[in-house]
Amino acid sequence: MSLKRIEVMDTSFRDGFQSVYGARVLTDDFMPALEASVEAGITHFEVGGGARFQSLFFYCNENAFTMMDRIRSLVGPAINLQSLARGVNVVGLESQPKDIIKLHAQLFKKHGMTTIRNFDALNDPNNMKYSADCICDAGLQHEAVISLMDLPPGCEGAHDVPFYKRTLESILEHDIHFDSLCFKDASGTSHPNKVKETIKMAKSILPKDIPVRYHTHETAGVSIACYLAALEGGADAIDLARKPVSGGTAQPDILTMIHALKHTQWDLGLDEKKILRSEEVFQECMKDYFLPPEALEVQPIIIFSALPGGALTANTQMMRDNGTLDRFPQIIVAMEDVIRKGGYGTSVTPVSQFYFQQAFNNVIFGPWERISEGYGKMVLGYFGKTPVQPDPTIVQLASEQLGLQPTTQRVVDAQDANPNKGIEAARKKLQQHSLEETEENIFIVASCKEKGIEFLLGKGKVMVRKEKKQDSPAQKSSTSYAVELDGTLYNVSLTANEVTVDGKTYPVSIQSAKSTKESSLGESSKEVRSVLAPMAGQVLKILRGKGDTVKEGDVVFMLEAMKMEIEVKTPFSGKIVHILTQVGDSVNSDQKLMEIQ
């Protein structure tokens, strides 16, 4: 029997990192694994873009462009290095104007990428056209994407084979050039028969020389079945990963797929013993990283709520950080209603994050009491046309809460008209901080905003999650106590930025405080009241200063939590007498942020 060679892209160093470690991996740590992968015969890697751009600046204190340069230098010129782009959003959650979209393609070509996989979560070709042109003009291979998922039970009108056919036909009608086509299911919820029929449909429409790739995750437990169905439908290529970032929330393992294809008409062209050796090197490289248990699990409930693997662990890790992980099951349940009413955008970044943020708000603050900015703008049309019309009641709520009217304006046109976006706006920010105005720095500021500035100023922090090693008593930098409270004894240890109570760790900001008498000196006898953090997060902005007079409802802080910017409003009027935290600090729910008299 003649075997059909199936091309494999190894997603370990991009989607694998995102799906398992929330994209927080230091470059030095995985380079030996990458070298071993090349030696094992792998010739196509996903290594950049997606969350592995912002995460380098936000959490690793590394420059993503430097990472890409190092990878290209190590693998040589012949390896296909691929990155992920989000259409008009390029590598962030916010949409960008044309000059930044063009700069993205040029810089990723400059820093060693071969191919850019380009998708729009709403499957709106208007959001793909310009970015596709820029990718091709930069001399990169363009892999166009149709994003897949299964809808919650009882929903219809999108995400079936006829919908994907209309989407593909619309891409062709918009004259979007692509060198390959990928059907990407970030949540792993598509059922195998739909996958097979969708691939068959695409192969019947496309020219013979256009390869079709299928991408899924193991999260819902059907990834191998879907890959086999995709191959039966005529797929030419698939995405796989390797331990310790395979299975669970990521792609299935290369070794598992080699085994599944034995005695079939398909072959991956890889030596399983060499792949096994590369996995051993990879696991050794990652041995110190915290491996969240949910990253290893199949989650059947995802079939109802379609939370992508790449978002699942990133969000559970953030929930661990701010002490809300116990609410995760409720949030997953709440996502079903959010998807039903949101217009059926595919649950992939940024829409997956919009879904999760809104579900988070519905659980924490009450159903639809607080519309998240991303979700609200999506249902109002600010990210493009949703596959179906969102629930009109939710559209009205979003309009009222965000102070915005629904729009049908093209996203790139709206961004071009925004004076706070684009190359010139980024250049002004660099000038304000006396930073070098390179193209790379411009793009960093445009895509990473304040955190990009902090990185360029040398104020970035390393926030990767590694297992804590037990230090000898002489090496410990923490202080431990046995604290008795209401007759109960608690084991408490304290470091510069963490407090651990009976094994549960909370981020804290520790500062010297004045005594009650000292803090009252020079102040009037008028009552001093505190503004509290509504949830755990990181201080992003402090909008008013000591001595300022504020009115009830004024926004005084911006926190970042769950990839959202959370406004903190003062519940009373008065004069600010103390600021109790600073930009960059981690704060807990109900922690005092400022005092007002």
Image: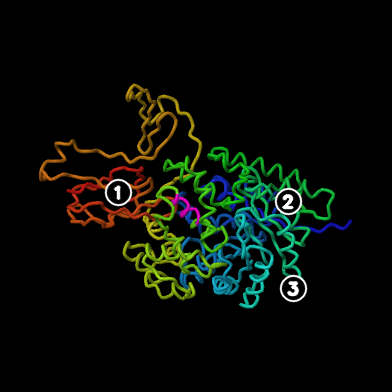
Which residue sits at x=71%, y=46%?
275
Location of residue 355 in the rendering, given as x and y in whole percent from the top left corner: 50, 56
Give the mark nearer the N terminus: 3 vs 2.
3
Residue visible at 42% across and 35% down in the picture: 505
Q: Which residue is mark 3?
A: 207
Above or below, 198 relative to 584: below
Magenta-highlighted stretch: main secondary structure? Answer: helix
Q: Residue 220: x, y in percent? A: 64, 48
Report the Cα–Cα distance between label 1 and label 3: 58 Å
| Region of the chain picked out in magenta, as a range | 355-362
Residue that protrudes farthest toward the top in the picture: 487
Contact between marks 1 and 3 (CB within 8 A): the answer is no
Q: Is residue 56 visible?
A: no
In the picture of the structure, the residue carrying the numbered disc 2 is 225
User: Is residue 115 a member of the stretch shown in magenta?
Assistant: no
Q: Which mark is residue 582?
A: 1
Look at label 2 and name its amino acid: Ala
In this rendering, is residue 198 above or below 534?
below
What secondary structure is marked by label 3?
loop
